[in-house]
C-alpha cells in the first residue's frame, strides 16, 4: 500500500456501526464505499467525475471513467468519541470506535502477493482541506493531463482535496482503485450489489493482524462487544 503524507505509526480512528464491523470481521473482509457525492454526502467529492475538458483537437474529454471505480474508507487522526461523532458515523445505531495505525492496518490486507497491480490500486492518504474556489480552480484548469501519471498517484490525489467545511474530521482516507477488466478484482474484490450500480466493494482482510483496539459506543452492550472481540481472536477462515 502506498502512503501519501501519512505517518505509518500514527494513531488513526474510525467509528462505524457494530453490526457492520462484526460482519466484516466474521467474513474476513474490509468493506470500502464507492467514492462519489451521493454515497459520501458531499457533491464535491471525486471532482473528476464531473470535470469536462477538451483535447488538442477540440473534442470533448472526461476522465470520469478513471475515477468512477474508486472506493474508500474514512479514518481520522482525531480520537473521535464526541456525541456528534457517534451521531455522524454510527447514525444512531449501536456503534464501535476502532483504533489502529496505518502500518498495522496494512498488515491485515491479504492482497500483496497475489495482486499483480497492487502498487497502482491500494493507497492511504491524508486529506487536504482547501477553499472551494481553490479546488474549482485546480479542476477547471484545461491542462487535464496533470491528473495522469504512470503510478496512478495524480488520480489518487484528486480525491484527497476536500472542502474546508470538513476540516475538523482530520481525515486519513484509505483508497482502492477497483480497475475494470482486472482478473484479481473480479475474483477477490466483489461488488455489492454485483452490477454497475454497486455502492460497495470489499477486500480480503485478516482483522487479527490489524492491531485494533475497540471502544464501545452508546447503545452497545457488553455482550455485543465481547462477541466482536471473540470474532477478532478466532482463526481466519481458509
Image (spheres, grey):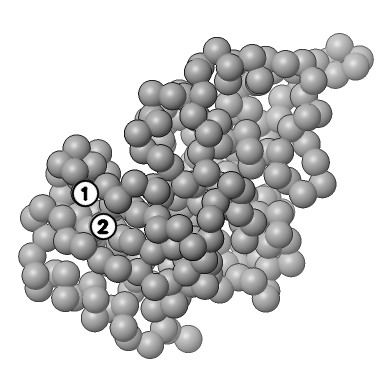
76 w.r.t. 133: above or below: below
Q: Quadrant of residue 12?
A: bottom left
Whether pointer 2 and pointer 1 mark residues with C-beta atoms closer than 8 Å, the reply is yes
In which quadrant will I find the N terminus? bottom right
| Helix, strand or loop for disc 2 | strand
Q: What is the count of numbered marks?
A: 2
Q: Earlier in the sequence, mark 2 or mark 1?
A: 1
Does 98 sit left or right of 155 as displayed? left
47 w.r.t. 65: above or below: above
127 w.r.t. 12: above or below: above
Residue designated by label 2:
97
Q: Residue at x 52, y 44 (%)?
A: 126
Observer-side mark, 2 or 1, equals: 1
Q: Which mark is residue 81?
A: 1
Does 183 sit left or right of 171 as displayed? right
Q: Residue at x 39, y 78 (%)?
A: 208
Amino acid at each position: 500500500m502506498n502512503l501519501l503524507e501519512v505517518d505509518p505509526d500514527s494513531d488513526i480512528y474510525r467509528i462505524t456501526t457494530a453490526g457492520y464491523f462484526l460482519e466484516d470481521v466474521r467474513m474476513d473482509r474490509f468493506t470500502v464505499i464507492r467514492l462519489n457525492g451521493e454515497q459520501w454526502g458531499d457533491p464535491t467529492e471525486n471532482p473528476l467525475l464531473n470535470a469536462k475538458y477538451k483535447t488538442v483537437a477540440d473534442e470533448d474529454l472526461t476522465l470520469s471513467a478513471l475515477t468512477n471505480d474508486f472506493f474508500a474508507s474514512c479514518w481520522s487522526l482525531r480520537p473521535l468519541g464526541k456525541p456528534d461523532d457517534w451521531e455522524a458515523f454510527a447514525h444512531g445505531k449501536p456503534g464501535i470506535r476502532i483504533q489502529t495505525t496505518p502500518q498495522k492496518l496494512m498488515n491485515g490486507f491479504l492482497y500483496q502477493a497475489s495482486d499483480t497491480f497492487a502498487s497502482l490500486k491500494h493507497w492511504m492518504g491524508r486529506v487536504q482541506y482547501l477553499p472551494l474556489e481553490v479546488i474549482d480552480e485546480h479542476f477547471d484548469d484545461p491542462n487535464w493531463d496533470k491528473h495522469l501519471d504512470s503510478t496512478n498517484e495524480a488520480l489518487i490525489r484528486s480525491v484527497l482535496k476536500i472542502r474546508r467545511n470538513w476540516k475538523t474530521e482530520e481525515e486519513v482516507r484509505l483508497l482502492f482503485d477497483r480497475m475494470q477488466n482486472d482478473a484479481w478484482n473480479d475474483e477477490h474484490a466483489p461488488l455489492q450489489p454485483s452490477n454497475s450500480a454497486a455502492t460497495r466493494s470489499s477486500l480480503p482482510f485478516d482483522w487479527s493482524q490489524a492491531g485494533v483496539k475497540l471502544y464501545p459506543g452508546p447503545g452497545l452492550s457488553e455482550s455485543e462487544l465481547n462477541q466482536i472481540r471473540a470474532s477478532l481472536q478466532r482463526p481466519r477462515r481458509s
